[in-house]
Image: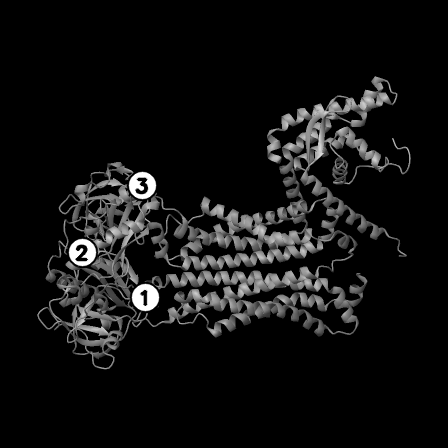
Amino acid sequence: MEWSRFFRRHRVDEELSREIDAHIEIETEQNIARGMSPEEARYAARRKLGSTRRIREDVYSMNTVGFLETLLQDLKYGLRVLRRSPGFTAVTVLTLALGIGANTAIFSIVDAVFLRPLPFPHSDRIFVVDRVGNRFGGHSLSMPMFLAWRRDSQMFEHFALVSWQGPESLSGDSGEPERIRSIGVSTEFFPALGVQPAIGLGFQPDQGRVGGPRVALLSDGLWRTRFGAAPSVIGRTVRMDDESYTIIGVMPRDLELPLPGMRNAQVFVPIRIPDDSQDPSNGGLLCVGLLKPGVAPEQAASALTPALSELRTRFPNMFTPEEKAHLELLRTFIGDWAGPAPLLLFGAVGLVLLIACANVANLSLARSTSRQREIAVRAAMGAGRRRIVRQLLTESTLLAILGGLVGLAVCYASFGAIIGLVPTSIPHVGAYQIDLRVLAFALLLSLVTGLLFGLAPAVGASRVGLSASLQESNTRSGGGRGRLRRGLAVAEVSISAVLLIGAALALESFSSVMHVPPGFDVNNLSSVDFSLSPKQYDTPEKRAAFIGDAITRLEALPGVESVAMTSSLPLRGGPDTLFSIVGRPEPTNLNEAPDALFRVVSPEYFHTLRIPVERGRMFADSDNASSQAVMIINRAMAQWLWPEGDALGQHIWVGKPMGPAYTEPSAREIVGIVADAREMTLAEPPFPTMYLPASQSPGTNGGSFLVRAGAVSAASIRSVLTQFDAQHPVGQVQTMDQTLMASVTDWRFRAILLTLFGALALFIATIGVYGVISYWVAQRTHEIGIRMALGATRRDVLGLVIGQGVLLALIGVVVGVVAAAELTRFMADMLYGVKPTDPLTFAGMSLLLIIVALLACYVPARRAMRVDPMVALRYE
Amino acid sequence: MPKRGAPPLDGELLQGTLDMLILQTLILGPAHGHTIAYAIERRSEEVLQVEHGSLYPALHRLEARGWIASFWGTSENNRKARYYRLTKVGRSRLSAQTSRWEQLVRAINRVLRPVTD
């Protein structure tokens, strides 16, 4: 209404002056009828009306600034009110700032992981193609599968393959040899994403074939750091993993592949896709396709499923009859991979904000009670109810926005620390940052917060009965309001209980994980990764010679106790494989074949890691290529497969269920059983593991050396390895402590943040309880005075006040504990060594809350004890 | 120009009261600004003096809220004049405001009631 008039204001003005003219005419006529002369009559009419100009201005301004002016008025008034009560304003703004700041920081994570759209055109049509219904689970794709699917991919515009494996070393130019992160992509991959190089050309079809030219695309980052951002880099030749590659282009600066583990790729090389493949291994491949417009993903999936049954006839051991093709939006895939931790934190931080809102609503209620008369006077002066609600809401929104601004400052200040805790394994789209989306979220949050905590007090205040308030001579009113306030305090305590219990469970889990004995001696143990170029080390003898040589030279370093080699470091997971047990029936279905982790190790492995041999023996030099093939298994595997009998002397045939291509030449005899070490992560129970001697595993071309030494410099370890080949980069030396900490980052992330939020909740709820009890005491000064005058002791008064607080806390804790028992179930997967309903945790946190509530009551209680009966009574 | 009874009230009418009086006047039928002003004065037995200068902004405000509507018509003396009439919303607002007013009056009366009561 007001706005439409705004645009018609000139016409309205014109009509108004005509209307006023008419008024003067009528008045003049009547004056003449009363006997005045025409001159006199007109003058009197004008005088009676007053300045016509003034009237026109009034109406004109009504149509221009009406709404804005009211807002401005409300804002000015609101600011004045807030300035007049700096304590209230400070507490409110601080409380809201903590809530909004923490929410904004966590939202930036949730946004990047789950919400932010992919930075690619047609991202609503980019799908990850996978199979379901196989024990290998998702993301187990083989080259024959890709070839069959690509043949049937008529529903896709582009059908592409991407591989985590690519060259690992870069040399052959002016710079130092360097280890690089690279990935392989089929030539269709970047077209599927809709990304083109910023400089140079994309991959051409012939570059993706076996025997085609070897070319590479650089990331913008590598191009700048290593090649000085020189455009002349196009056409230059570099060496990567002993092959020559021609650089054909540089990718755009903002390209960040959001796929897990690919974010920091520095070099992209084409996967050389064969015409046919007999290799059904699941080797770190991912299939990505751009659907044609209008094609449903289910439609495309059912078109790809027949290829799987066809493959099953070719590789009966690798496919099951239940398999189906499955399409998942790339965006969803990323969020699924990230897991529920960011959402858990978002939920927790949302609860913190809810507590903050309840707290501020509480403070506002207390204040609106004391402002009741001010409001009643305004109502009596003709302010409508809507107008009063609007004024109060303007005030609360003003507070919320102030809180939001300070909250943003809190968020900026803590952002680096929070983001530093996020495990790098969580894939996300774009960097974690406070961008426009996050700012918009903070603003929206502030506004919603303002409404949330402002509405109840505002509506309550405006409903105040006029006559009741005008007669009221003091502030001892609003029993119903008091109930609402205590209800809010109870809600705060109960939500805090939920958060504290969640935080305590996460903290206990982290602590339990950190106390898990890893099964080997972590102290004074370092590791360094190595890889052997397939050209230079092309025979098993050369590879074995390198490993033996490197171990000897590392052992010669001063201070080194012992050195070992392993294909995969403990605590970092690693490959597993299927096997058969000689003398037991072969499983008919691939899904029933047993599997175990396997590690290829040098004989000194168990000695160096201090993993005790429980039965049998360690590997010896006599275990070589010509002797009986042997293996050592861990206790978990022995107990799993031979719970009653003896594992020693049994024979295991590695890879047999997967078909001839994967089957070792002979079965291996189990010669030893070692204690369990945590091979996957600290939190995962010992997984059945097979250790194979390096001397009988001719394929080993990479892994890690483990160095046990009291004091040895990382540089001296690296220098030993660089001696072998100056052109071959050597990895960083890591202590086992670092590896261990890296394996628990997600536990740490959840524990630290949940504890932070729990503490925040406790803090805010404490202010809440303190506020309610202080107010209660202030309201009852009179009553307390009478009680003391009638002989109540200070102890009685103390008991009275503390009793009030404890009652609030108890109800809150009971409600909170019940809610927590329901909610912590959702954390079950993220807990270790503690049940979601651990009674000790629940009891401990309840006690903590009650004690803190007691402390919060103590200050007002002391104030109550010091009430002077005389003063209190005279006060009325 | 008070003639009889109580002298006119000083100063402005309470904000919102004029609105109510205008609405009440229009209940009898459409009228133009001049008529409305005199009708209020007559009905209050000249106690309430409508300041003509504030009448028009008030009419305008009421129209903006949709409580009254206006049209151009011909006055008794054959002049073009702007007439106002009560809308449906205005009618219901009037009854709401009237009852609010009565509440207020009762409340103030209670406060002012003699102490001996």
Q: Is residue B46 left or right of residue A723?
A: right
Determine the chain carrying the residue at label 3. A
Measure the C-alpha gap from mark 3 to mark 2. Answer: 40 Å
Judge whether A656 appears above or below A92 on screen. Answer: below
Element marked by disc 2: helix
Judge whether A145 appears above or below A670 on screen. Answer: above
Q: Are marks 3 and 1 on the same chain?
A: yes
**Residue at 70% from the left image edge and 24% from the top image edge:** A17
Circle on res. B12 = none
Please name the colour scheme applied to the rendered image.
one colour
Judge whether A36 appears above or below A717 on screen. Answer: above
Depth check: give the residue in front, A242 or A286: A286
Q: Are marks 3 and 2 on the same chain?
A: yes
What is the quadrant of the C terminus of chain A in the image? bottom right
Q: Name the amino acid, label 1.
A: Thr
> Can you identify the residue that label 2 sits on?
A310
Depth check: give the residue in front, A323 or A620: A323
Measure the C-alpha gap from mark 1 to mark 2. Answer: 38 Å
Contact, CB < 8 Å: mark 3 with mark 1?
no
Q: Name the amino acid, label 3.
A: Pro
Location of residue A132 in the rendering, given as x and y in whole percent from the top left corner: 28, 59
How packed mark 3 is, by other alpha carbons closer than 10 Å (few <14, some 14-19, many 20 or more), is some
How packed mark 2 is, by other alpha carbons closer than 10 Å (few <14, some 14-19, many 20 or more), is some
**Residue at 79% from the left image edge and 37% from the top image edge:** B12
Q: Name the amino acid, label 2.
A: Glu
**Residue at 74% from the left image edge and 34% from the top image edge:** B29
How packed mark 1 is, by other alpha carbons closer than 10 Å (few <14, some 14-19, many 20 or more), is many
Q: Are marks 1 and 2 on the same chain?
A: yes
| Total tally of numbered discs in the picture | 3
Location of residue A66 in the rendering, given as x and y in whole percent from the top left corner: 65, 36
> Can you identify the residue that label 1 sits on?
A681
Measure the C-alpha gap from mark 3 to mark 1. Answer: 36 Å
